[in-house]
Amino acid sequence: MRADWEESQRYTQIHEDNVPQTPILRNVVVAFLVGGAICTIGQFVYNTFLEVGLSPTDAGGPLAGTMIFLGAFFTGLGVYDKLGGFAGMGAALPITGFANSIVSPAMEAKREGLVQGTGARMFEVAGPVIVYGLTISFLIGLIRYFLRAY
């Protein structure tokens, strides 16, 4: 029994000695820089919409649509997945990462057909986020409606 325990301890030590260390500082810096770059692009697009005459309130919708399009477009080209592998949450967190989470499963399932493949898998990852977001938005809208009524 003691030999098994010693062998287990030896195996654990060998495992710990050979597991590569996670470069946490590098990951944080890269995520910050890539996420910041994506947000800088978003700010540039926002400022462009303001320059063409949209109000700050009206520029929000086209900005979100443009960034979602860019995320989906670069996912289709295979660029965004490589960026996500390099930058981690820096690429996953902005709205472009949300577009990537919808387009990637749809592209992988396209050989299964339009309905059962692309259509069914498109919202595999993002579906719960959309359902939760719509449900909470509806509930908050109801609460605000009833609070204004009284």
Image (tube, rainbow, N blue to C red):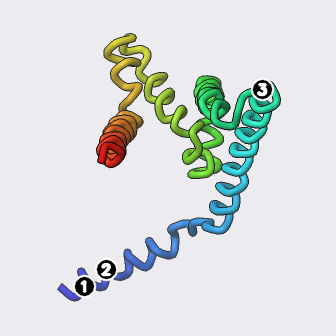
- Tell me where residue 88 appears, x and y as whole percent: 58, 51
Which residue carries the number 2 mark? Answer: 7
Mark 2 neighbour class, 10 Å CA radius: few under 14, some 14 to 19, many 20 or more = few
In this rendered view, identify the residue nearer to me: 9 or 95. Answer: 95
What amino acid type should be assigned to the residue bearing mark 2?
Glu
Q: Which residue is drawn at 36% across and 15% down?
A: 112
Q: Which of marks 3 and 1 is in front?
A: 3
Which residue carries the number 3 mark? Answer: 53
Mark 1 neighbour class, 10 Å CA radius: few under 14, some 14 to 19, many 20 or more = few
Q: Residue at x 57, y 66 (%)?
A: 22
Q: Quarter of the image holding residue 124?
A: top left
What amino acid type should be assigned to the residue bearing mark 1?
Ala
Q: How far apart are marks 2 and 1 (CA)?
A: 6 Å
In this rendered view, identify the residue nearer to me: 30 or 123. Answer: 123
Q: Is mark 3 on a helix, strand or loop?
A: loop
Q: Distance between the residues labelled 3 and 1?
A: 78 Å
Which residue carries the number 1 mark? Answer: 3
| Residue 14 position (above or below residue 47) | below
Locate residue 6 relative to residue 51 in the image: left or right: left
Q: Quarter of the image holding residue 105?
A: top left
Q: What element carries label 2?
A: helix
